[in-house]
Amino acid sequence: MALPSNAGTVAALGTAQTLAWASTYYLPAMLAAPMARDLGVGTPTVFAAFSVALGVSALVGPWSGRAIDRHGGRPVLMGTSLLFALGLAALGTSQGVWSLFAAWALIGLAMGSGLYEAAFSALVRLYGHGSRSAITGITLIAGFASTVGWPLSSLLEAQVGWRGACFAWAGLHLVFGLPLNAALPRLAALAPPDPAHRLDADREPPPAVRPRLTAALLAFVFAATWFISTAMAAHLPSLLQASGASLAVAVGVGALIGPAQVAGRLLEFSFLRHVHPLLSARLAAVGHPAGVAALLIAGPVAAPLFAVLHGAGNGILTIAKGTLPLVLFGPQGYGQRQGWLMLPARLAQAMAPFLFGLALVQWGSGALWLSAGLGASALLALMALPRVRTGEGKQPPT
């Protein structure tokens, strides 16, 4: 079956991912406070419910990945568009703590089967080893999710209240998200493997180290880098103030993170696409520890450099979460394997705001040693991974 143009698929999936991220991951930053006031709970309670959603998404990932392996991304992502709409509508109708947590748990089901890991799996199911550019493309588009989501959520809350904002996001999933995901190519379900007729992709040489060790190292890299990314997203202004920066400087420096992430992804899309994905990931992993070193040595004057190094590295590592499992293990069973590899990362992401917040209270700017140590550990784990040939250009059977 002939596939549609890669560019069209990337544009549709990238736009749907922008909507998915803007209406879930970036929603609490703008709506948590009005939610808490209206429901009569503390703002931390709303973020606790959001953490439950992240935990649920971690548990759902392997099973949604397996479904994409067998049936392709189109039916799974279409289903998650409906789940996103249902969960956001439930959030808009919540009346207390229990309904708040239940709504976020439902949104977590959609997040576990409808964010980057699912999109990466859908692309690998379509393009096999040739998915690297497509993965980079959707992260480039969805990299503007906060740029779109935060102002739109704030505007909607001011015009129609936080409940109206939730209903509006739910409607957008039905009007835009569902048709965009429906535009993905249809694929036949994969038949169970026949030992007498193994697929070409199954004949590829195994990684240079034991697969279980490779998977463990990769899972640690993802968990460490997602912990850092989420901790910085939640606490960067306070962290910079603890390092001696003023509030105005901290806010201005924080605004550099998003553009730096996009710049890193553009670098991956242009120059780094010609190097091995593992080398690209290793270079990116240097970003956060190097930025911390500059900040600790030079003080607030180095805060912009810290933001650029952290943001660019984080932008490239987001792509690495899709490309490294592909290059190290191949496209067969990618979705389910991706779900298991990202499970520790999702759990680390859920715990990061709380745990790093404790470190910030106890140690002040010394909490940077924690994030830098995790970043350096991730780099060492990447150095221990084998470099194998990418085999780009192969495609799985449809």
Image: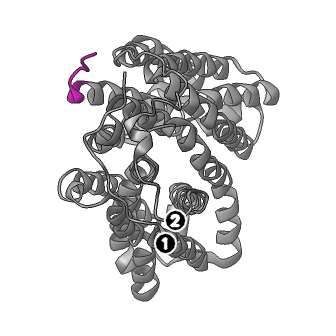
Q: Amino acid at mark 1?
A: Ala
Answer whether residue 328 is visible to the viewer in this image.
yes
Q: Amino acid at mark 2?
A: Val
Query: Which segment is the magenta one?
Result: 1-8
Element on which disc 1 rests:
helix
Mark 1 vs 2: CB contact within 8 A: yes
**Residue 282 position by quadrant:** bottom left
On screen, residue 165 above or below 363: above
Residue at 42% in and 53% down = 205
Image location of residue 110, percent across then percent down? 59, 27
On screen, residue 122 above or below 117: above
Residue at the outermost bottom position: 297
Residue at the outermost right position: 98
Residue wearing tag 2: 209
Residue wearing tag 1: 384
On screen, residue 339 above or below 64: below
Nearest to the observer: residue 88 or residue 117: 117
Residue at 31% in and 45% down = 132
| Magenta stretch, main secondary structure class | loop
Residue at 80% in and 30% down = 97
Numbered marks: total: 2
Residue at 61% in and 52% down = 349
Image location of residue 393, percent across then percent down? 25, 40
| Disc 2 crowd, CA 10 A, few/some/many (<14, 14-19, 20+) | few
Which of disc 2 and disc 1 is earlier in sequence?
A: 2
Image location of residue 122, percent across then percent down? 42, 30
Mark 1 and mark 2: Cα distance apart in space: 9 Å
Answer whether residue 22 is visible to the viewer in this image.
no
Q: Please check the rendered image and state whether residue 7 is part of the magenta-colored stretch, yes or no.
A: yes
Element on which disc 2 rests:
loop
**Residue 167 position by quadrant:** top right
